[in-house]
Image (spheres, rainbow, N blue to C red):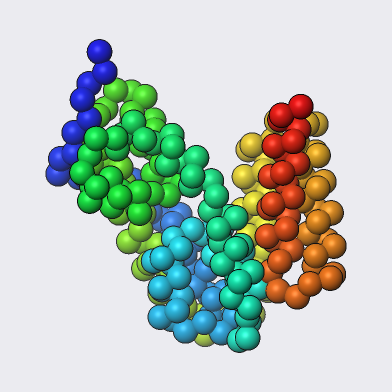
Amino acid sequence: MTARVSFTAAGVRRGFFAAQVLAPGVVLYAMVFGVLASERGMSWLQALLMSAVVYSGSAQLAALQGWTATAAITPVIITIFVMNARYVLYGAAIQPWLAGLPRHQSWGSLFFLGDGNWSMAMREYERGYRDAGYVLGSGVAMFVPWLGGTLAGHLLAGNVPNPAAFGLDFMLVAFAAAIGMVLWRGKSDLWPVAAAGLVALLLHRLLPGAWYIVGAGVAGGLMGAWRHGR
């Protein structure tokens, strides 16, 4: 029999303290975003609001690639949606945790859902733990340092006059490369990579803004779906 899922303050506390191990990395990642956001001309309030609403390091760094004082908002928004498409799968996978809970508990937990606490919550569920407060607590434990790191990075940006000299502008590329290496399954993945690279190169030369990021994500996804369905 599967134990019934509950939602208690004890579960929230357990998730919050369990996720503290992730907090230092979250702060550093957020500080990099804050520094780069300042370099791109964002105010501290704009950077903080973006971290609070978008709450995705990879999507925010990708959006910055097309951010200028006169940035076209459409490619930035689409870039964020493409980069965050994985959360559709996260939400479906974590449904057993949250099914049957009141909306304010399930939706609140989903708002704070991130890569790190999603994997922690799934691991706890597989071990038989059934207090869904864990999802919310672990998410808050990552959300708070993400905001604090963003603000700190933006305020300290004046002490980093040339982020590129420290390789901070390479953060998104490094992050994507690391994720790609972890998820690499063999030669079959070359097709989506090639499609994404080719489309990105063409759009970068033909269109202004961040459309090359959007196009690469869509092309890679479509090629992967086509290969998988063969």
Residue 132 in sight in this render: yes
Q: What is the residue that sits farthest to the left in this orientation?
A: 9
Vertical position of residue 100 compared to residue 111: above or below: above
Vertical position of residue 7 compared to residue 77: above or below: above
Q: Could you say where residue 63 lies in the image, as x and y percent from the top left?
A: 59, 68
- The answer to which of 208 and 51 lies nearer the viewer is 208
Q: Could you say where residue 8 lies in the image, as x and y percent from the top left?
A: 15, 40
Q: Quadrant of residue 189?
A: top right
Who's the residue at 22% across and 30% down the image?
5
Q: Quadrant of residue 49?
A: bottom left
Horizontally, residue 193 falls left or right of residue 38, namely right
- The answer to which of 161 and 29 lies nearer the viewer is 29
Vertical position of residue 202 compared to residue 209: above or below: above
Quadrant of the frame with the N terminus:
top left
Q: Could you say where residue 176 lies in the image, as x and y percent from the top left?
A: 65, 51
Q: Could you say where residue 90 lies in the image, as x and y percent from the top left?
A: 46, 41
Vertical position of residue 209 compared to residue 140: above or below: below
Residue 137 in sight in this render: no
Who's the residue at 24% across and 47% down the image?
103
Who's the residue at 44% across and 57% down the image?
26
